[in-house]
Image (tube, rainbow, N blue to C red):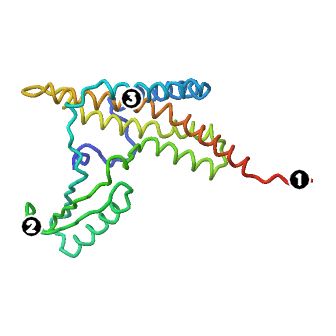
Amino acid sequence: MLCSRFVKANGEQRKNWRVADFDRGFNAVQRGYTVSLRWCMDRARLVLAAFGLSLLATALLFYVTPKDFIPAGDNRNLHINSEGPEDISFDRMVARQRKLVDVLAEHPNIAGYMSSIGAGGSRSTVNNGSILLLLKPAGERKLDLDAIMLIDFALERQRKEGMEPAQAIFDACRVRFRPIMMTSMAAMAGTLPIALSLGAGAEVRRSLGLAVAGGLIFSQIFTLYLTPEIYLSMDRLQQRFQRKGRVIPTS
């Protein structure tokens, strides 16, 4: 609804100067990333060594950082509210809710769910529904979506276009740079109100917000530069095992 107030369907039109300036700035950042990525891919051992040092630093920080300020709020439950058109019938709402549940049920991090629609509890109309998800234990959940985006794209280029692994992952990083950065910027924007909070108890919320924002920045940098090296290392390891598994005929 908000976009409909600003986006006009008039075909081709000139971009607003703010949008044009943003695009120019973002394209400059993307060109810089492409150059720096090529530099890092030419120095794989250095990047992997930095990864090893980051693991050691993470373990050290986990050991020395006080744990009492981190909230223990993961109870493995996730509540979702759904809403359909105001004039929808009960049967149509049931069909839509089932489609939503089918999509959620395929997610590997979900252990179970309970779904309901119609009036009841806090819901007063038939076009409302709720879904209670039971997540798997935290240790079994992995949600590094950005790295998955890069690897899926690279594998598709390798299999369908016959690209070399290094060129495939390089193109994946270059093409997927914008959506990955947009996702990270949106996540960081969500943490800024907490990081910049004022008022009573602000110091607790601010430290948590700064930790989340800093973690997003640090993990994003490592994802953009480390994922290609991990991908190429795994590819070389796979090729080595395939060569060892071949039977060499003897004369």
Direction from residue 98 to residue 163 in the image, left or right? right
For the residues carrying marks 2 and 1, which lies nearer the camera in this image?
1
Note whether 248 is above or below 17 in the view shown: below
Note whether 87 is above or below 239 in the view shown: below
What residue would you read off at disc 2? 120
Residue lying farthest to the front in this orientation? 63
Labels in figure, total: 3
Between residues 208 and 11, which one lies in front from this camera angle?
Answer: 208
In whole angstroms, how far apart are the C-alphas of marks 2 and 1?
A: 76 Å
What residue would you read off at disc 1? 250
The amino acid type found where label 2 is placed reads: Gly
Note whether 182 is above or below 148 in the view shown: above
Q: Where does residue 187 sit, x and y in percent of width and height?
A: 30, 37
Q: Residues within 10 Å of mark 3 (few under 14, many from 20)?
A: few
Q: Where does residue 86 sit, x and y in percent of width and height?
A: 15, 65
Mark 1 vs 3, N-terminal side: 3
Q: Secondary structure under badge 1?
A: loop
- Residue 59 is labelled as 3
